Image: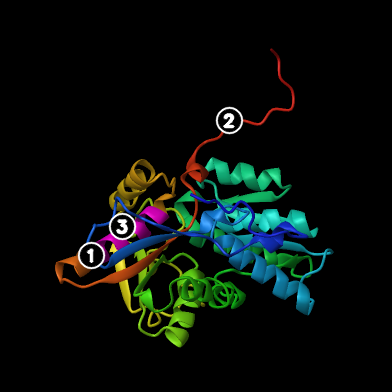
Amino acid sequence: MTARYLRGRFDSIAEAVGRTPLVRLRHVAPQAPGIAVYAKLEYANPGGSVKDRAALRMISDAMADGRLDRSKVLIDSTSGNTGVAYSMLGAALGVKIQLVMPSNVSQARKDIANAFGTEIIYSDPMEGSDGAIELVRAIVAKEPSRFFYPDQYSNPSNPLAHFEGTGPELIEALGPRLTHFVAGLGTSGTMMGTARRLRQDAPHVHCVAVEPQDALHGLEGLKHMASSLVPPIYDRALPHEHRGISTEDGWDMADRVVAEEGLHVGHSSGANIFAAVQIAHELAARGEGGCIVAIVCDRGDRYFAPLRWEKKYVW
């Protein structure tokens, strides 16, 4: 087996975002002739999640047109991964970052963002991502000149990152073999941008949007659209199909994938893979072939409570 150890030589960590690998799932997916299920490992981005793509594009576009410079503070609401991406890129590009997030997001995400020097403002955990959105809007309204508020839920640069990145990468890697694309709905940027590109350049591909089956759920980062503030960038008609996945199925699949495939993925990724495997079973039952790609948003260790970092040790 030959390994490629170097993806490139970069002048900044920002240049390492994108070009993530595809890994075939050979154990959790049905072994049927002509059916392949792939995981697109977005945790291979330098910030550890798919949100690196959108955060980089939103920051780059704002710096290019003058909406953001080093005199302003970038502030946004996040359930965690976008905040980590903002924090990493802010440190690399010299931009101050403040984040508003529900206080019950994983401790790992809080600690990672803090490590980059980010200031975190906590919103009511019972109000979820919608509560964080409302709080950040109130903060910006008080001092609009102090902040750049990218608003990942309405910023067209969010889906554009996937229209110009994720979509072309899938087409380049799989070409006409690709039959299905599966991604979860949070801000919805991954699905909106990728589906728009696939509809344009690979219209045979069936795009499947995954969301929690119930309003009260444990699939962190995903939105139950019927009971949530709907992101302005979201277009329900763009995916060909929507699938509701239960918290239990998402968590159980994440456990299976780490045990059977050696891929330690988060629970929203487990939900995406569960939907992809469902589709593979349905194709196999009809005697059809297919090539299915599911987005793996982040790693499972992002949900661990890490050891506290200490500057001094006593032995």
Whether 281 is among the magenta residues is no
- CA neighbours of label 2 inside 10 A, class few (<14), some (14 to 19), many (20+): few
Image mark for residue 124: none
Q: Distance between the residues labelled 1 and 3?
A: 20 Å
Which residue has dot 1 on it?
33
The amino acid beneath tag 3 is Phe
| 284 on left or right of 276 | left
Residue 96 in view in this figure: no
Which residue has dot 2 on it?
307
Residue at left 55%, top 54%? 44
Residue at left 49%, top 62%? 130
Which residue has dot 3 on it?
274
The amino acid beneath tag 1 is Pro
**Does residue 102 lie above or below 194 as drawn?**
above
Secondary structure, mark 1, is loop
Q: Distance between the residues labelled 2 and 1?
A: 46 Å
Q: Which of the marked residues, 1 or 3, is nearer the chain's N terminus?
A: 1
